[in-house]
Image (cartoon, rainbow, N blue to C red):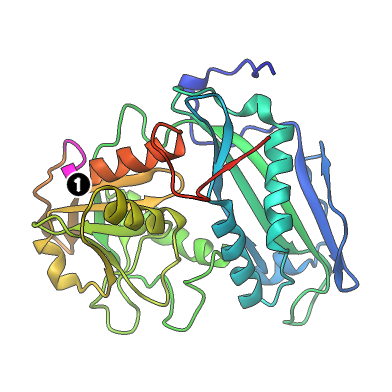
Amino acid sequence: MEKKDIDWANLGFSYIQTDKRYVANYKNGAWDEGALTSDATVVINESAGVLQYAQTCFEGLKAYTTEDGRIVTFRPDLNAERMENSAKRLEMPVFPQERFIDAVEQVVRANAAYVPPYGSGATLYIRPYMFGSDAVIGVQPSNEYQFRVFCTPVGPYFKGGAKPITIRVCDYDRAAPHGTGHIKAGLNYAMSLYAIMDAHRQGFDENMYLDAATRTKVEETGGANFLFVTKDGKVVTPKSSSILPSVTRRSLIYVAQKYLGLEAEEREVYFDEVKDFAECGLCGTAAVISPVGKIVDHGKEICFPSGMEKMGPVIQKLYDTLTGIQMGRIEAPEGWIHEIR
């Protein structure tokens, strides 16, 4: 199969339309068979539930070309499970997990020419999403829904390597204790847009959100989970019912314990103890790990010993091991690598 004529090495992290996407519709209490289409346009009523009341959820995962030339995805079963949980919380019909994985396979297979070659640093980003599609005017769940999957080739999140970023402690709350912070709902990201743009205007790369109830515990950023390393090499990640359960974060904890022989724990992390950590990173699908060099708390700086020039040694090992697993250079745990044939 011949690849598309794309300058893979210079791809940005932005949308490029590919040939095919998957569409399934829910009507009269059931999902239809679903199919691939070349039409990238979504046509819905002006009063559709997604437009009026933000009834939508989504996922994000990637397809890679491994060292031996296979096209694979990474743990899509966890994305399918998380989307099921998101749909239930938003009173949306569940798109069955096995059909989710099949839809992802169909889209990647149909767009195989867009999967970047091994060694290019680029990947194929896959975006499954679902939304209320029929007209509603009262505040209520939609009766009809559309599930779609599209993909787009993207370059590495960090051009020229991952340089540590500077983040601030945010005055805004990301999620309420019993709200929707634990699901991947579009409304969570809409709420974070002002805060992230304000951070950028103030010269910061990202926000650190604290828990809304007490503002004493670390939660996450608008789109990534935190990962800390203690001075004696233990990996620590915050635990909260309002944190999105990141697939990348869960995988990194396993890698720390089983591949690197490190202690790792998920627990409540109080902001007061952040100054005592040796390393800090943000983890998610797009970047895998973004190193954090400095946190600014209303003028007071917390500078990590790992510095502002490169990833800390433990985070670098975690990054290298997980990306090695994803790219086929390191043997993966059973079920982590899903080959597209």
Tell me which secondary structure the magenta stretch mostly adopts.
Answer: loop
Vertical relation: 4 (above or below) 234: above
Q: Is residue 199 visible?
A: no
Q: In the picture, residue 338 is in which quadrant?
A: top right
Q: Residue at x 35, y 79 (%)?
A: 212
Question: At x 48% / y 29%, what residue is drawn?
Answer: 122
- Does residue 324 appear in the picture of this structure? yes
Q: Is disc 1 placed on a helix, strand or loop?
A: helix
Q: What quarter of the picture does the C terminus occupy?
A: top right
Considering depth in this image, is 195 or 232 the residue closer to the camera? 232
| Residue designated by label 1 | 314
Q: Is residue 289 above or below residue 274?
A: above
Decide whether residue 214 is among the magenta residues.
no
Q: Residue at x 73, y 64 (%)?
A: 95
- Write down the quadrant of residue 152 in the picture: top right
Residue 91 at x, y = what percent? Answer: 69, 77
Position above or below: 116 against 23? above
**From the image, which quarter does the N terminus lie in?**
top right
Label 1 Cα neighbours within 10 Å, binned few <14 / some 14-19 / many ≥20: many
- Between 302 and 197, the one lying in front of the other is 302
The spot of residue 253 in percent (x, y) is: 33, 57
Going by the image, does 33 lie left or right of 254? right
| Residues rendered magenta in the picture | 309-313
Q: Is residue 168 left or right of residue 2?
A: left
Q: Position of residue 151 (x, y in %)?
A: 64, 39
Is 218 or 245 nearer to us in this picture? Answer: 245
Whether residue 312 is in magenta: the answer is yes
* Amino acid, disc 1: Val
